[in-house]
Amino acid sequence: MKALKIIVFGLLSVIMFLIIVLFEINSWPVGSSISGLVLGFSLPSLWKSIQDLTDTTEWKTSQRKLKRGDFIKDDTIIRISFAYLYRIKIGDKYLLVKNERGTGKDQPVGGVYKLFGNEKIELKNRYKVKDDNKEKFLREQAWRLKTSISSRLTKHSQLSP
């Protein structure tokens, strides 16, 4: 679907450009103006389609949609939490445990990663991150940090040196 959009908008843009050239060479004023208007709408759509094709993960697609809708900007602060889940299958069923928050719901086994030693300092030095200012998270040493969406940390799908 993404490739089809690029092909359609690409062909439309090329055709409109050729019509502009043809009408300008023959000094026909109306056709080039109309083609210019259509080209003005098709080129931004072509560019967005190319960007969408380069989004290789679901979170990049979601982030781009939020940016396009002006819900977030490059300096918007986001909270990043690192957690894990274990999928334990017994027969054809999965092991679930009661939620600790008192909701009475079941959940998979897992939790948030904890920071030990100089890990927090290392993350702050390597990436532009701040502590999550919720007292509970600071007390637990949970691996929850805040950063802007334009930081180096959010541009990588994994933490690597």
Image: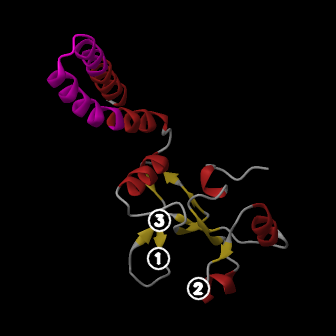
Magenta stretch: includes residue 20: yes
From the top left corner, tell me how far across and down residue 6 is, in percent. Answer: 35, 27
Q: How crowded is mark 2: few (under 14 residues within 10 Å), some or many (20 or more)?
A: few
Q: What stretch is highlighted in magenta?
A: 15-44
Query: Does 86 sit left or right of 139 as displayed?
Result: left
Q: Looking at the image, do the residues carrying marks 1 and 2 touch, with CB atoms under 8 Å apart?
A: no
The mark nearer the N terminus, 1 or 2, is 1
Q: Mark 2 points at which residue?
A: 134
State yes or no: discs 3 and 2 in contact (Cβ < 8 Å).
Answer: no
Q: Which residue is drawn at 74% across and 72% down?
A: 115
Q: Residue 96 carries which label?
A: 3
Quadrant in the picture for residue 153: bottom right
**Residue marked by disc 1:** 99
* Location of residue 63 in the rendering, given as x and y in whole percent from the top left corner: 45, 54
Element under label 2? loop
Residue 20 percent across, percent down from the top left: 27, 20
In the image, which disc is placed on residue 109?
none
Q: Which of marks 1 and 2 is in front?
A: 2
Q: Report the mark closest to the observer, 3 or 1.
A: 1
Image label count: 3
Residue at image position (47%, 62%) is 73
* Amino acid type, label 2: Lys
